[in-house]
Amino acid sequence: MEAVLSVKNLSTYFYMEEGVVAAVDDVSFDLAPQEVLGIVGETGSGKSVTVKSVMRLIKSPGKIVNGQIIYKGTNILEIPENEMYKIRGKEISMVFQDPMTSLNPLYTIGDQLMETIIQHQSVSKSEAYKRAVEMLQLVQIPEPEKRMRSYPFEFSGGMRQRAVIAIALSCNPSVLIADEPTTALDVTIQAQILDLMRSLQERLKTAMIFITHDLGVIASMAHKIMVMYGGKQVEFGSAEDIFYRPIHPYTNMLLRSVPRIDRKIDRLQSIPGQPPRMIDIPKVCTFLPRCPKRTEKCQTAIPPMEEIEPGHFVRCFNPVRGDE
Amino acid sequence: MLKYIIRRLLISIPELFIISFMIFMIMYAAPGDFLDQYRLDPTISAETLEAMRKEYGLDQPAIVQYLTWLKNLFKGNMGYSFYYRRPVSDLIWERVNATLILSVSSLLFSWALGIVTGIFSALKKYSFSDRILTVVALGLIATPSFFLGLLMLYLAAKTNWFPISGMISTSYNQLSAWNKFKDILWHMILPVSALSLGSFASLMRYMRGSLLDVLNEDYVIFARAKGMPERVVIYKHALRNAINPMITFLGFSISGLLGGALFIENVFGWPGMGRLIYQALIQQDMYLVIASGLISAILLVVGNLVADMLLALVDPRVRLT
Ligand SMILES: Nc1ncnc2c1ncn2[C@@H]1O[C@H](COP(=O)(O)OP(=O)(O)OP(=O)(O)O)[C@@H](O)[C@H]1O
Ligand SMILES: [Mg+2]
């Protein structure tokens, strides 16, 4: 199936006084309609910068230095900035990590929901109101009419994230990006929000990019998974590929660091070493310093993304094969 | 809301009592009194001095003096000025307009300009014009207003472009209404500039910083991410949040309306309260000092109240909790 969103060789760098941070380096992926792509990786691996680049929300000192972002046949990077608002929120929309800060404290939920609807759909105020109430119902906010008049501070964290999801979905976007939408919430609320997102995705068939560093969450949400490390994608494949046949050493170690019920292991393993300092990194694999399988060859070049089996890509000279 | 305002005003009444009492006690505790200048004068006899002491009530204990003053205050009498031998209220009333003209126009000028240039330089962060504005602002903040006033006086005297003193020309009475207005405006330019440039500069820097902070907030980025045009993102979502912390500042500005111009009025010979209060302080003209202190205190209360009300108007978190 033709991809709704296709990212090709995306590189986003931050030009800091201390040097250049290659926050995202040569990242490519396709997102098919109705598909959920999970992005995992430890903190600072470039997950947020990747999706912010897709939305063109990168501000100086950051810059998209290379690549294409093709949305339904158009390269988003070629759209003038003052036209981007036609894409954002309408075609591709985004849910942020912290619901406590993503809503403007001075306007009612209804206002913030309706302004989005009015902006993107040529509807009257009363129609926008009706649609806004429907959206609140859709995200299971009780007493939606009353809640339209509430301010964000009158909402709990979970309710706010529901409202944010309602705003993000209010104009039927083709792609929804959720950047760790549950990280800031209590565990029980997390589960509720995840259930909600899963059922909405199934109902509305919106293609979705879902970022998390919780492998358990990604297992229950994503069809495809991209693993990032140090600004690069190290592995990409279907959820089964990644969970049952991981081939990059980092993915392997990541999986061994989470408890699982279907496999008996004596103890959870942590990954030794530190995430890379991202400034002016040398032109080798970013995982090299922590990699147990490194060889001479790794010192010479950055490994390319290689298709090991259909749809399963890895960026490694010494992929892990079988159940090592 | 109305209930809230009334409650605030009621609370302020005991505050004002305490403030007036403290001013009274400070004046009393200060060495010497109004009659000192006469004691130095050999032509004034001891009997005359004693008579004046009685007349002014200075022979009474402080607490009695205060209570007498308080009693008169309730009858609408703020006491008499020793020096002018006239009711304090008349003296203040004559001069309050001149001061208000000066300080209200400075307030409006510095706020309007400060907010607008602050927004401009935040939106053009690190551009050439932002850098120029930053340098100018830091220079103005570092310069005391009376020095700025003196500098302007010097230039005015050199160039003859502006009058150097007073509020009206000698020919004022012969002028038509329109020309009278222009005449006052003409005299106002220098003192208003001297008075407002400093606060304009700090307001601008404050506004710039506040807007830059807000522009980094998640809700501003979210507004952009949901496809609001940049105009809406800035003027609806960012600006109102950025103005919020400025409002407390406005309260302070209001409370400084009468006292803030003291130096500048002296420098420019402006016939306002500033000079009156300044002289009264030097001469220990007690009731005049207390009255002006009380007025400043009332302005402080009013300024805070106005700020709180505006805050409630802008911010639902204040209004609804
Ligand atoms: N505004 C910025 N200025 C400078 N560097 C930045 C900026 N934003 C991100 N970076 C850099 O880009 C790198 C990737 O950051 P990013 O936010 O994408 O990480 P992440 O994978 O989303 O991590 P987390 O799980 O903590 O959200 C980081 O190393 C960070 O130093
Ligand atoms: Mg992130």
Image: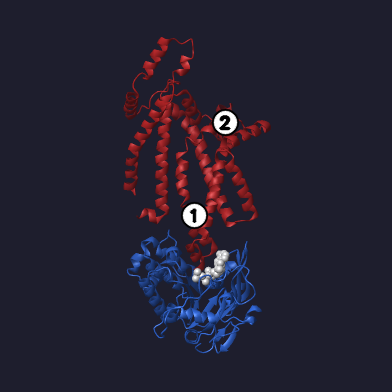
Residue reaching furthest to the right: B159
Q: Kindly indicate the quadrant of the structure image that contains residue A307.
A: bottom right
Q: Secondary structure at mark 1?
A: helix
At which x and y percent is residue B116? 55, 50
The image quadrant that residue A298 belongs to is bottom right
Disc 1 Cβ-to-ligand 1 distance below 8 Å: no
Q: Are marks 1 and 2 on the same chain?
A: yes
Q: Which chain is red?
A: B
Quadrant for ligand 1? Answer: bottom right
Residue indicated by mark 2: B267
Mark 2: amino acid: Val
Q: Is residue A70 left or right of residue B16?
A: right
Q: Is residue A43 above or below residue B286?
A: below
| Amino acid at the residue labelled 1 | Ala
Residue found 49% across the figure and 28% down from its top: B278
Q: Secondary structure at mark 2?
A: helix
Colour scheme employed for the rendering of this structure: by chain
Q: Position of residue A105 (x, y in %)?
A: 43, 60
Task: Compare marks 1 and 2 and give the one earlier in the sequence.
Answer: 1
As drawn, the label of residue B242 is 1
Chain A appears what colour?
blue
